[in-house]
Image (spheres, rainbow, N blue to C red):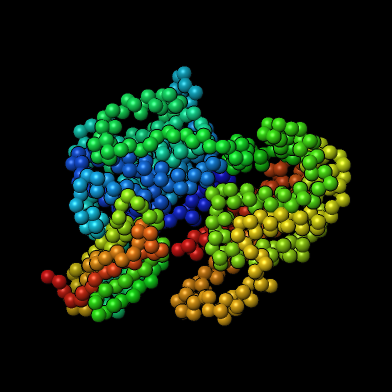
């Protein structure tokens, strides 16, 4: 599984509101039953359920649209990431499935068939006497099955991504086989249409439109592509989508330099040397900007950082962690390692920036570089809501102060809850520090391996050949996400 | 081999879209002239409970001495909610306060109903079903009483009220 898929799945699971999966499926069943109470027609009920799924997903997508900006923008890629769509919509892992590409003559994109052997929606359906929706009453055998609501959700999320990525194609996802209806698996077909074909397809569904018109009175507004002004992230997302992470990791430093040059030429219409010339004699500010932008780019992924920092306590905790990090980095990271980072920056700038600028950067000590980066990151964190001037010398003083002021309730249950969460918070901090330590050993390997095996070899050599730095970091983040999930429960 | 309902007890599902679906359904029901939406949602909760207890129940008997723990366990295990509970033994009311209700999050202008009516129906039915076979006179029976506050109404939290009575019911 790629880094992007893993990250998206983790974020969705940790920050989504979950319940027990049995409650979820029983609620889904009850919704279908209530629809059928009104329509008194099984075929119509399934069409309405699909429509409710579409509307529900659309509402969620509209609320969290920024997170989808970093999803891949082509229909084929969206389908490659079907696993993420499943997790986004259903919250559980997609296990035991197969994927088949069906050649479609004269078309830019082929059709896809997905067979999912285990369907949570159909689990044991028909075993309990409350399972009263009668699939045997269906006269039209082509009608979708029990997962049609889920199917509507998946289709809407996929098309929402394509819409905000300004792509001219749309995906139709239909349930072709359903376990409850007697199928041996849950089977979806995914067909890709250009906008004209898509509109024709929508127009041809007269019977469906009539049913929706009869019961809903109004239809879901389709395809209003807002021609909003493109921001810099919109312009850059073609090249910095997280799904390209693996591609970048495959390329050595020279490849990355070429790519950066291309971005500067394409997006800013200037030569790299001209671009970097703006920072000549302001090299320290350039490094601060890297730190500043680094934090803001992190925040771009759904504004999670900013939202988290709206919580006063979380902002304080992060502020203390940042302060500790700033002090600890210089204390514990060997100067050689810091110097390697400086050398890496110099190697990166050579050929891209004017020689005079490269010479100026060479004069920085490793310590200077780290301090500039932290300065920039601190400015960004202040922007996002951490008031560093209010922080005490250490976190324990903060806790003591709050108790004396009575800001933390003295009610035992609240204290107990805080105590319960303490181990998780400490674990998160510990795992975070370990991740940073592991990353900090990277640059020397990048330099050594540049001429031999490339960046990926360097990454893989840090911890062990079997697991690699990527694997190790991923494992640590797995722990961090698990701890956050525990706290959120 | 497909999942069984018992397997589903072990996993969690993300509610975001399903939560939205409840309000879209309620709107759909209202537009199609369904009377008494509140009772309809509670009935959905009761049906969920009837199936659910066949696969999981928190205990074999519920009395006034363990009612708080039982309700806390149901909210935690089924809804992943951490709640606080108060019992008013004068009016025989149980007041459950939930800051992160699984079924309510946003205020909808187009509909004046709280999704947690479903929870009210489900929790009271689970407890009543557990005690249904009991001959113990101290067994408790719960009925949905009222959603006093809800995030769906624009409040900061959901407050669900249950009415309880003890002893065997005929």
Q: Quadrant of residue A310?
A: bottom right
B105 versus B64 height, above or below: above
Q: Quadrant of the C terminus of chain A?
A: bottom left
Q: Identify the residue shown where x is 52% and y is 75%.
A: A408
Left or right side of A99 for A39? left
Q: Is residue A452 visible?
A: no
B69 versus B150 height, above or below: below
B145 versus A18 height, above or below: below
Q: Position of residue A28 (x, y in %)?
A: 31, 49
Left or right side of A101 for A4? right
Q: How many marks?
A: 0
Left or right side of A426 for A130? left
Furthest toward the top, the residue is A106
Q: Position of residue A334 (x, y in %)?
A: 79, 60
Q: Identify the residue shown where x is 46% and y is 48%.
A: A63
Q: Identify the residue shown where x is 12% and y is 70%.
A: B170
Q: Identify the residue shown where x is 79% and y is 36%.
A: A273
Furthest toward the left, the residue is B170
Q: Is residue A41 visible?
A: yes
Q: Position of residue A103 (x, y in %)?
A: 45, 24
A483 versus A103 height, above or below: below
Viewer-side residue, A373 vs B72: A373
Left or right side of A482 for A395? right
Q: Quadrant of the N terminus of chain A?
A: top right
């Amino acid at each position: 599984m790629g880094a992007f898929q893993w990250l998206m799945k983790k974020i969705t699971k940790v920050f989504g509101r979950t319940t027990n999966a049995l409650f979820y499926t029983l609620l889904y069943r009850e919704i279908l039953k209530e629809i059928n109470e009104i329509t008194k027609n099984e075929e119509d009920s399934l069409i309405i359920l699909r429509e409710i799924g579409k509307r529900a997903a659309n509402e969620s997508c509209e609320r969290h649209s920024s997170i989808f900006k970093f999803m891949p923008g082509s229909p084929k890629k969206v389908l490659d990431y079907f696993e993420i769509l499943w997790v986004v919509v259903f919250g559980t892992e997609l296990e035991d499935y197969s994927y088949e590409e069906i050649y479609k003559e004269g078309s830019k994109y082929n059709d896809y068939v997905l067979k999912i052997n285990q369907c949570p929606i159909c689990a044991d359906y028909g075993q309990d006497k409350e399972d009263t929706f009668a699939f045997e009453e269906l006269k039209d055998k082509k009608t979708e099955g029990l997962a049609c609501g889920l199917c509507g959700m998946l289709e809407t999320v996929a098309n929402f991504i394509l819409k905000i990525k300004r792509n001219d194609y749309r995906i139709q996802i239909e349930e072709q086989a359903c376990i409850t209806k007697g199928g041996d698996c849950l089977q979806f077909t995914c067909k890709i249409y250009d906008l004209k074909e898509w509109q024709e397809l929508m127009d041809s569904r007269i019977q469906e439109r009539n049913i929706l018109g009869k019961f809903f009175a109004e239809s879901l507004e389709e395809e209003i592509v807002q021609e909003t002004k493109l921001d810099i992230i919109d312009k850059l997302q073609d090249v910095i989508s997280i799904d390209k992470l693996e591609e970048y990791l495959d390329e050595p430093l020279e490849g990355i330099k070429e790519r950066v040059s291309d971005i500067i030429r394409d997006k800013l219409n200037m030569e790299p040397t001209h671009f970097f010339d703006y920072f000549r004699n302001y090299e320290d500010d350039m490094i601060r900007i890297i730190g500043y932008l680094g934090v803001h780019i992190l925040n771009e992924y759904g504004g999670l950082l900013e939202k988290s920092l709206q919580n006063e306590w979380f902002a304080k905790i992060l502020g203390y962690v940042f302060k500790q990090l700033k002090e600890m980095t210089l204390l514990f990271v060997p100067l050689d390692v810091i110097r390697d980072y400086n050398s890496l920056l110099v190697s990166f700038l050579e050929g891209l920036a004017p020689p005079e600028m490269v010479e100026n950067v060479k004069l920085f000590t490793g310590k200077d570089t780290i301090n500039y980066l932290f300065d920039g990151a601190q400015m960004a964190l202040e922007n996002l809501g951490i008031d560093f001037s209010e922080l005490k010398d250490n976190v324990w003083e903060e806790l003591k102060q709050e108790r004396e002021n009575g800001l933390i309730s003295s009610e035992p249950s609240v204290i107990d809850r805080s105590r319960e969460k303490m181990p998780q918070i400490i674990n998160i901090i510990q795992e975070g520090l370990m991740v940073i330590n592991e990353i900090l050993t990277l640059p020397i390997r990048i330099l050594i391996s540049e001429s031999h095996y490339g960046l990926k070899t360097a990454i893989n050599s840090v911890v062990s050949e079997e697991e690699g730095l990527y694997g190790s970091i991923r494992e640590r983040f797995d722990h961090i996400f698990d701890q956050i999930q525990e706290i959120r429960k | 081999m497909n999942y069984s309902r018992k397997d589903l007890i072990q996993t969690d599902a993300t509610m975001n879209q399903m939560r939205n679906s409840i309000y879209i359904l309620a709107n759909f029901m209202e537009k199609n002239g369904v009377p008494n939406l509140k009772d309809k949602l509670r009935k959905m909760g009761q049906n969920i409970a009837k199936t659910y207890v066949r696969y999981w129940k928190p205990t074999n008997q519920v009395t006034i001495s363990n009612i708080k723990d039982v309700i806390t366990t149901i909210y935690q295990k089924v809804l992943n909610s951490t709640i606080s509970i108060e019992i008013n033994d004068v009016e025989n009311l149980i007041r459950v306060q939930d800051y992160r209700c699984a079924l309510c999050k946003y205020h909808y202008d187009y509909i004046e109903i709280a999704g947690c009516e479903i929870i009210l129906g489900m929790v009271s039915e689970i407890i009543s079903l557990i005690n249904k076979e009991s001959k113990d006179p101290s067994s408790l029976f719960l009925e949905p009483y009222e959603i006093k506050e809800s995030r769906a109404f624009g409040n900061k939290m959901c407050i669900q009220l249950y009415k309880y009575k003890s002893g065997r019911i005929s």
